[in-house]
Image: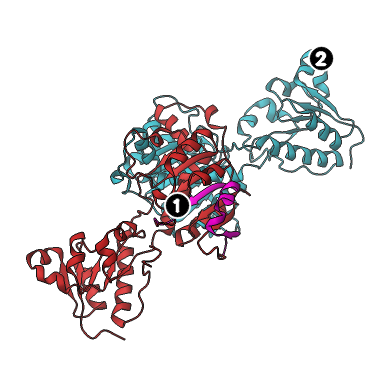
Chain colours: A cyan, B red
Amino acid sequence: MPRGTPPVILLSEDTSSAQDERILAAAPGARLLHLRDIETDAGLGRAIQVAYPSLPAGLWETTPALEWVQVTMAGVDQLLSRPEVRRHPAVITNVHIHADCVAEHLWGMALMLTRNLARAHRQQVDGTWNSGPLTSGISTLRDRWLCVAGLGAIGRRCAEIGVAFGMRVIGISRSGRRVAGVDEMVGPEARREAFARSRIIMLLLPDTTETRHFAGRDEIAACRGAYIINGGRGSGVDTEALVAALREGNVRGAGLDVTDPEPLPPGHALWSMPNVVISPHYAGVHPGYNDEAFEVFLANLGCWMRGETLANIVDRATGY
Amino acid sequence: MPRGTPPVILLSEDTSSAQDERILAAAPGARLLHLRDIETDAGLGRAIQVAYPSLPAGLWETTPALEWVQVTMAGVDQLLSRPEVRRHPAVITNVHIHADCVAEHLWGMALMLTRNLARAHRQQVDGTWNSGPLTSGISTLRDRWLCVAGLGAIGRRCAEIGVAFGMRVIGISRSGRRVAGVDEMVGPEARREAFARSRIIMLLLPDTTETRHFAGRDEIAACRGAYIINGGRGSGVDTEALVAALREGNVRGAGLDVTDPEPLPPGHALWSMPNVVISPHYAGVHPGYNDEAFEVFLANLGCWMRGETLANIVDRATGY
């Protein structure tokens, strides 16, 4: 049922006047609040019904009217780790606008490892032309298995690129349900066997109680010369077991956009391992990100005004 | 017409006894010579009819019976630059077994640049977790143009990967003839316009008089924020113009597996430019390369014995 009265919307980051106009076109008569308004008049906070792109930490306990928060990230583990957020009945929606850029990022990391390009780049820093040390230990992709854990939009894009490289793809999801373009799907209980046959393992898992150490000691021990690429959350990998396996060689290389602990502390063994590439958690960043996230909010605001179900509602039970 | 008498074959690199057996199965009764045989008996060289995987430099003038040389590289520019080779009437065949590995290599280089992963790797060497400097200047691929110059097996594979990343592809070939999976094809005369609209330009050209400075001063000046990836020959790019354009920004980045001069001398400006990745001419290397090349030779030897046309005959007029 369409809403009868205009909503009170908190815009917790600055918007342009053009954006404000578009919000008002989607929600005619809405009252648009900014953080400075609440700071000067604390009572206003109690009236907030919608928040974008976040609800600042202190406000969750003082916004009884809050019905919906549209956030602009995909992973909401940190948000849901706070008790006041878990207690609040507001609907949380996230965005799924990372698929292309994360797939590009993770494949870049994978190829830096399989083609020895990270090693070549360190040699470049020294200014020496010497192919000798770079031509051994190269991995080819055709007909090898790519394992993708987590078959959301990002995982499916990563699988598509793998297929373009001539790889066969085994996917791991909670349901193990068939996914178009993925050769085989299994449930998490079969992951050791999936790891054992794969040359590249891409992890795109959210941080939940079920995914902690998804690639744990036993799973990592099952790898036979695989590359592990983590674009999900650092907690998905047992870091200590990974470091040992990288030394022993049953894990050939690791590309990590996320780590555990994160940030990776200075002096950590991973920093200086020759078969590791690390990017400080920016695989999801791309130009135009904020604009795309705003479009998701606007479309959802239209749904909300018409009383329709919102897109991308976070399932508080599964945590994603 | 099948050959009546068994051929004399020079194996200029050591073969295994299993390989020798397979050669003799394809060419029953063949006489297999090794370099040491010729060294001890110079007259033997005059009887050589077939050579694999090369004919050593000094022998071209002393092998009047030579009919066919199967080489194991794709680019024969250096071979054909020698007058005694150009004068010799022997057929030269090359191999086209690089498509997958060169495509993986060049796409690895491209993504290292578009996702700032080369920069991230230099930061990793310093052991610092700091996404700040890495999140600006990222390029996305979807809906942007990929220009592929040279549409042989390698160029077509590179184009296919670009399509998987959601790019549109403009190809450049001598004929400008339509190629499956490539959105638009043009001839070399239209390359400036093709460069001007492309985000990534991949060069897969042999070294011939026509391809020297294919990306010359004017073509490079036409680029509007493109990445140039060279997997062909160094002579295809005007290095001086490239360095200037990388400084000015109309070329955003360069990934070079080949350079001019090559090897790139110590202290050359390209070594230390932040938006350049260099690999010392090994994009074509992959495990199993020698085995695949041997299969090409065996198949061709079968053709030769049956008097059929060989595969991959180098056109001495075009130089590839």
Circle 1: residue type: Glu
Residue B181 locus on image (x, y percent): 57, 62
Question: A74 above or below A46?
Answer: below
Determine the secondary structure under disc 2.
loop
Residue A41's tag is 2
Q: Nearer the viewer, mark 1 or mark 2?
A: 1
Residue extending furthest toward the right: A4
Disc 2: which chain?
A: A
Residue B113 in percent (x, y) is at 49, 40
**Disc 1 to disc 2: CB gap under 8 Å:** no
Residue situated in front as seen by the camera: A231 or B289: B289
Foreground pick, A291 / B102: B102
* CA distance separating discs 1 and 2: 58 Å
What residue is drawn where x is 59% and y is 46%? B196
Dot 1 falls on which chain? B
Q: Amino acid at mark 2?
A: Asp
Q: Residues within 10 Å of mark 1 (few under 14, many from 20)?
A: many
Q: Which residue is mark 1?
A: B104
Q: Which residues are magenta?
A: B180-207
* Marks 1 & 2 on one chain: no
Q: Nearer the viewer, residue A289 or A72?
A: A289
Q: Position of residue A41 (x, y in %)?
A: 81, 14
Task: Using the rendered image of the protein, determine whether residue A144 is visible from the camera's viewpoint.
Answer: no
